[in-house]
Image: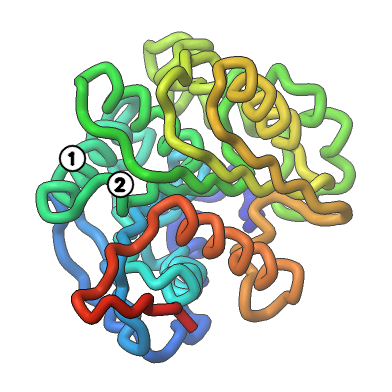
Amino acid sequence: MKVADDAPIEQRRAAMDKLDMIPRPRKVDYVDTFVGGIPAIVATPTAARPDRHILYIHGGAYVVGSPKSHIGMCARLAKRAAATVTVIDYRLAPEHVYPAAVDDCVAAYRAIIADIDPSLVTIAGDSAGGGAALATLGALKAAGDPMPGAVYLLSPWADLTASGESVVTRAPYDPMFDGDGLIEAATTYAGDTPLDHPGVSPLFADPTGYPPTLIQTGMDEILLSDSTRLAERYESFGVDVRLDLRDDLWHVYPILAGYMPEATDALVRAAVFIRERTPAPMPSSGKVVVPT
């Protein structure tokens, strides 16, 4: 969502949170809580057994966004994937610079896998949240923590140096995001850390050993090059990666699931991927439960 770059940060955050005025999906329990000490909304579908868990990291250029802005889309994904979803309220810049956001993501993930097999967990995120998801993988790998079963990325902001050609070539076509404030937002988040540091720009990290990954991106998208280069890099390191590109679509288009057919279809494809990569344990009856 576009908001004036020169608007006060409180106004920009409030505008983003207005997405929660859209009715949340029904047949889902919503709980405001803390996960690993991090504020979060946990959404649990009630119509089908949630056999897996999604840790979702919201976008917003690391300066805006919250669980409120993304819970609607995340609940729709959770229902289709037969999963509980935890959307965390990680610390934002400029009050908290790198690595505060990543530290919060790691804390939430560790709390989740204290009760759930990591192979049943998906780490997901959009835009800056996609970058934070990747940076979280790097932090987990460095610390020797178990990896999740899958990763789902929507238009990930993986290169904060803005070196991708699509920042320029796709700018006239992306109605959701423009490139004018990319470097300013990047430096606000990075603080004293170089923009090409792998924790800040995980495009430059070593992804050896990373889980199967789905990347969904629109072709009319200024961060298109982040996605295409990330997929190429993953393939070169032997990571199982799927790059799902769609013509005439823009930055984080799946957030309109439920209101735009192309966005709904994207979440369906994501849910299928998550179910495939985080298979549910066999019920004691021996019958397979098929999510609706």
- Residue, x 47% and y 48% (percent of image)? 125
**Element under label 1?**
helix
Rendered-image quadrant of the N terminus? bottom right
* Residue 66 percent location from the top left of the image: 38, 57
- Residue, x 26% and y 68% (percent of image)? 42
Q: Label 2: few (<14), some or many (≥20) within 10 Å? A: some
Answer above or below: position of 214 versus 71: above
Q: Nearer the viewer, residue 289 or 197?
A: 289
Observer-side mark, 2 or 1, equals: 2
Residue at numbered disc 2: 119
- Residue, x 83% and y 28% (percent of image)? 168
Q: Label 1: few (<14), some or many (≥20) within 10 Å? A: some
Q: Please report whichever mark, 2 or 1, sits nearer to the chain's N-terminal start.
A: 1
* Residue 81 percent location from the top left of the image: 45, 68
Question: To which quarter of the image does residue 104 belong?
Answer: top left
- Residue, x 35% and y 41% (percent of image)? 92
Residue at numbered disc 1: 107
- How far apart marks 2 and 1 lie (CA) works out to 17 Å
Q: Nearer the viewer, residue 59 or 235?
A: 235
Q: Nearer the viewer, residue 230 or 220?
A: 230
- The numbered disc on residue 132 is none
Answer above or below: position of 247 versus 190: below
* Residue 7 percent location from the top left of the image: 55, 49
Question: Residue type at mark 2?
Answer: Ser
Q: Residue furthest front?
A: 286
**Element under label 2?**
helix
Question: Residue type at mark 1?
Answer: Ala
Side of 133 relative to 234 (left or right): left
Question: To which quarter of the image does residue 33 belong?
Answer: bottom left
